[in-house]
Structures are given as structure tokens and as C-alpha cells.
Amino acid sequence: MKLRFIEYWILHPFWGGIDYLTFSFLRLFPLNQVSGFGAFVGKLAKKRFKQANLDTSANLQLLIPEITNEQKLLTSDVMWQNIARTLSEMAVLDKLNIGKNIEENDLNVLHRLDKNKPVVFLFPHLGNWEILAMSVSNQGFKLNVMFEKIPNRFQRKLLITARKRIGYDLITPDYQGTRKLFKVLAAGESVGLAMDEFSNNKIVAPVFNGTISDRSNIYYAITLARRFDAPIVLGLCKRLYKTSFQVNYDNPIYLSSPEYLGQSDEYFAEMINIRLKKWILENIDQWYMLHRARING
């Protein structure tokens, strides 16, 4: 009880204040400098968080058995810098410019969708994943993104404010959040969820050799799509160079279409898992993989 009191009333305000000052400071600088600061922090973080670095190295060895130690080191360096860049860029998301910093491909996928009907968007933690929400919102969709609820209420408010600057709402993964999720979908709005996720310090999805858990976000997305007759759209953001990004979309998956008549949830989950694995393996140096990967289902 005493530890909880200290954490809530002392540690949370302290670290929340530090982050607030950091974000306020970063907002004084141009986007390129903020991102560059993140890359510098990423190099330091790799040395500081030894267990996460060990897990990253183990992931690379398991996923790419033929990788050399030199390649593993380089890939790990890029990954840490990408993550730190993305976290630093949170402070200045509204300074990212579609067209200047962000190249949007496959927009015909979004143009074919009815913006007054619900769509379930799925994305992986690659590149700067926040940009996908920016892109979807920019195309006229009313987007609500389910995000991990951070225990520190000050840090949580800071991140919510940063994300709302680029035009989308957030939903917490709890009972109230579920009610809101159903409400916005029933009203014809769209939702976004992460395809890759972790629980108890281990990766839940993707599964590289086995089957996806029916308690994963992928299954949840399928459940929502069936309930609200909504298409599922997979989106990917890649960092091309420093603050240059590329966004790509897959064709919508209509679960009720004649093409998929009679197919099970397991079928769609595996379809999405295969796509997710491909994207990750092609861009593994940009994957947020600080937790031990689940190689077997």
C-alpha cells in the first residue's frame, strides 16, 4: 500500500513532469533535429537496457538463423535508433507533413471505401506507426485507435494530447474502452488496432511457427469486422531515411464476400499473421521487438 502511494503521488508526477519538460523542449526545434536527438538517445538506450538488447539479439538469431554477428549488431543499432526516433517524434507529430515527409501509396484502397461506414484498420509497430493514423485521418476517416493504457496518468495525458494534434481519438483497452469501441463502430466510424502485440514480456503476435492466439488483437479485429460488417484494411509505415516515410495499404478484406464464403476466423487470422510476418521480416530493423518473440504457437 505504501509503495503504491509513493508511486502514484511521487514517482508518477516526477517522471510525468520530466517527460512534459522534455516534450515542451523538443517542440522548440525542427522535426529533423528532434528525430536526430531520438537517434542519439537510441544509441544510449541500447547500452542502458541490457535485457531488452539481449532479447533483441535472441529474436534476430531465431528469425534469421544465417545472420552474422556483424549484421546482427548493425540491425540492432538501426532498430534501437528507429524506436527512439519514433518516441521523440511523438512530441512533434503535427510537424510531420504528408507529401513532404510522408509518401502515401495505394490510396485507391481508401478511396474505394465508404467513409460513413466502419472500417477496421490493422497496423504493425514498424517505422513510425503513428503516421498510419495520420494518413487514415487525412483521407477523411473518423478514426479511433485502441492504445496501450500507460499506468502513469501524466505520461498518458501527454501522449493523448500529442496524438490528438493529428486528428484522431484514442480508446483504452478496458471495459469502458470496449463500450466506446462498439459505439463508434455502430455510428459508422473506424477503428485502428495493432497487429503485433506483447503480454507478460513476450510477443503474442505474430507467431512465426504455429497458430495465433484467439485472444490476440488479430482475432478481436476479426470479431469486430464480423459484428459490424466492416472490411479489414492492413497498413504499413516504413522509415525510408531519417524523417522520410512511406505508407502502404493492402486491399480490404471483406469477410462476408463470396470469395471468403464459409471461411473461419482461424483462416482470416492466419492470413493476417502471414502478412504480418512478411512485413516484419522484410523490415526487421524497424520492428519494435524489445520483447522475446514467440517463434512457436
Image (cartoon, rainbow, N blue to C red):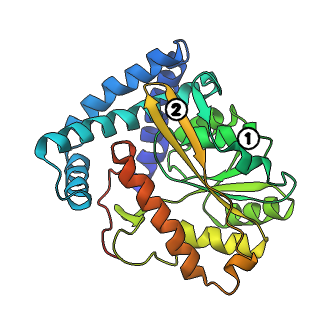
Location of residue 207 (image quadrant): bottom left
Element under label 2?
A: strand
Question: What amino acid is labelled 2 in the image?
Answer: Phe
- Coordinates of residue 171 in the picture (x, y in percent): 67, 54
In screen coordinates, is 143 left or right of 284?
right
- Coordinates of residue 123 in the picture (x, y in percent): 56, 53
Residue 159: image tag: none
* Residue furthest front as drawn: 259
Of the 4 image quadrants, the one containing the C terminus is bottom left
Q: Is residue 158 above or below residue 263?
A: above
For the residues bearing labels 1 and 2, Cβ distance under 8 angstroms: no
User: Which residue in the protein does label 1 denote?
Assistant: 137
Question: What amino acid is labelled 1 in the image?
Answer: Ser
Location of residue 104 (image quadrant): top right
Of residue 235 and residue 77, the one placed in the foreground of this image is: 235
Q: Residue at x 70, y 77 (%)?
A: 259
Residue 134 seen from this side: yes
Residue 154 seen from this side: no
Q: Residue at x 49, y 42 (%)?
A: 9
Q: What is the distance, in whole Å, between disc 1 and disc 2 at their CAs?
A: 17 Å
Element under label 1?
A: helix
* Residue furthest left as drawn: 69
In screen coordinates, is 279 left or right of 192?
left
User: Which residue in the protein does label 2 denote?
Assistant: 245
